[in-house]
Image (tube, rainbow, N blue to C red):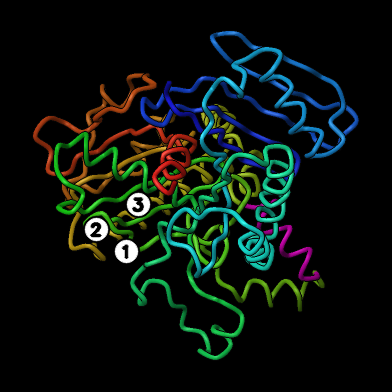
Amino acid sequence: MSSTVLVINSGSSSIKYQLIDPASGSSLASGLVERIGEPAGHVEHRTDGRVTEQNDPVPDHADGMRTVLDLFEKVGPALGDANVVAVGHRVVQGGKYYDGPVLIDDEVVGLIDRLSPLAPLHNPPNLTGIRVARELLPDVPHVAVFDTAFFRNLPEAAATYALDREVAEQYNVRRYGAHGTSHQYVALKAASMVGRPSAELRQVVLHLGNGASASAVYGGRAVDTSMGLTPLEGLVMGTRTGDIDPAVVFHLARNAGMSIDEIDDLLNKRSGLKGLAGYNDMREIHRLAGDGDAAAALALEVYAHRLRKYIGAYAAVMGGIDVLSFTAGVGENDPEVRASAVAGLEFLGVEIDAGRNEARSKESRFISPDGARVAVLVVPTNEELAIARQAVSLL
């Protein structure tokens, strides 16, 4: 019987999960528990082409996990018969400590907790999911896979901020990155698509979702990434500013009378595409721009300008590009964003075929012309499968 891994991604008010066969890459079941702690919860469990839904209140994560386990027993596949060899947990921040998956014990739980100030919106709910799952599934190894792990060994010149060294060391201020599980998965998949070893390639990966990040992967190793101490730095995102002059914080505090918490909320939750155009859904922004909305049109230009800027910067870091990959919700599904991102980059050998770019598909594919100097790809990410495979590789 094939081995399976139960992958859990615990958020502040949700639990996403998948039961995966890491050898074949197939998903036996998947689901979502959302609106945890609200008056009306929602649960979806998908398996064998069927969808089971519940709309009962989900008071807390423990109740949510019990609901998930109950659905596996009632709807299937039964975990007791699925040969579950591990539970893989997504954890955003592993700090300077982890460059790969780790077996979870009490010491690891404590360290994830201590790293919460570096990812206050992510590590605490990740940790809640770990604690609940360990309690409810005590006989299965639990493995943490960190978003930061792929970027743990960035070159020091890329990881280090030009901040007072003693302050930086005391408060762990450095570039950690995020979305590393996705960037690593896509870079490996891209190498297999072009038929060359990762060690020979200079790759740029653009993970474009509501959160967005770029990475430079040289010889299979991450050498730079756009997110920094937190996921706020870098590309324009759904609600986050991305790169911004840090003096904006001082300016708003002194002249607008805003508190640190208010500025934090502004930069992380009320900026980016939402701040520019009023929406963080790229489809709505395209619709508005098509109707002549100047703010939406500018938001798209700002978004694409930042992408081109990072592609060019990473070409400089690596001495050129062999592969450029688009992934995540926007990267996989928005041909207009892809076309705008590479417009004017022909001097780097980056160009796309309009027909291939416009074609709709859920599969990995080339969108560059035959014989192009740079292979431009769309690679659907699969972080859950990557987590499952890393968990099995550790065990």
Q: Which residue is mark 1?
A: 223
Front residue of 100 and 55: 100
Query: Disc 3 versus disc 2: distance between alpha carbons?
Result: 19 Å
Circle nearer the N terminus (2, 1): 2
Residue 351 screen position, x and y as percent: 21, 39
Q: Image point 74% across, 31% down: which residue?
A: 34
Circle nearer the N terminus (3, 2): 2
Please report the bounds of the magenta region as a residue range: 259-271
Q: Image point 32% across, 19% down: which residue?
A: 359
Query: Disc 3 versus disc 1: distance between alpha carbons?
Result: 18 Å
Query: From the viewer's perspective, is residue 238 above or below residue 263?
Result: above
Query: From the viewer's perspective, is residue 199 above or below residue 327?
Result: below
Q: Which mark is residue 218?
A: 2
For the residue labelled by badge 3, is the local secondary structure a helix, a strand or a loop?
helix
Q: Specify the principal SS of the magenta part.
A: helix
Query: In which quadrant of the rendered view does residue 333 lie?
Result: top left
**Left or right, residue 222 beside residue 279:** left
Where's the N terminus, which quadrant? top left
Task: Single out the mark in the foreground, 3 or 1.
Answer: 1
Amino acid type of the residue tagged 2 in the rendering: Tyr
Amino acid type of the residue tagged 3 in the rendering: Arg
Q: Image point 62% across, 18% down: which residue?
A: 78
Query: In which quadrant of the rendered view does residue 24 lie?
Result: top left
Mark 3, residues whose alpha carbon is within 10 Å: few (<14), some, or many (≥20)? some
Q: Is residue 383 magenta?
A: no
**Left or right, residue 390 beside residue 84:** left
Query: In which quadrant of the rendered view does residue 259 lie?
Result: bottom right
Q: Which mark is residue 308?
A: 3
Residue at the right extreme, as displayed: 39
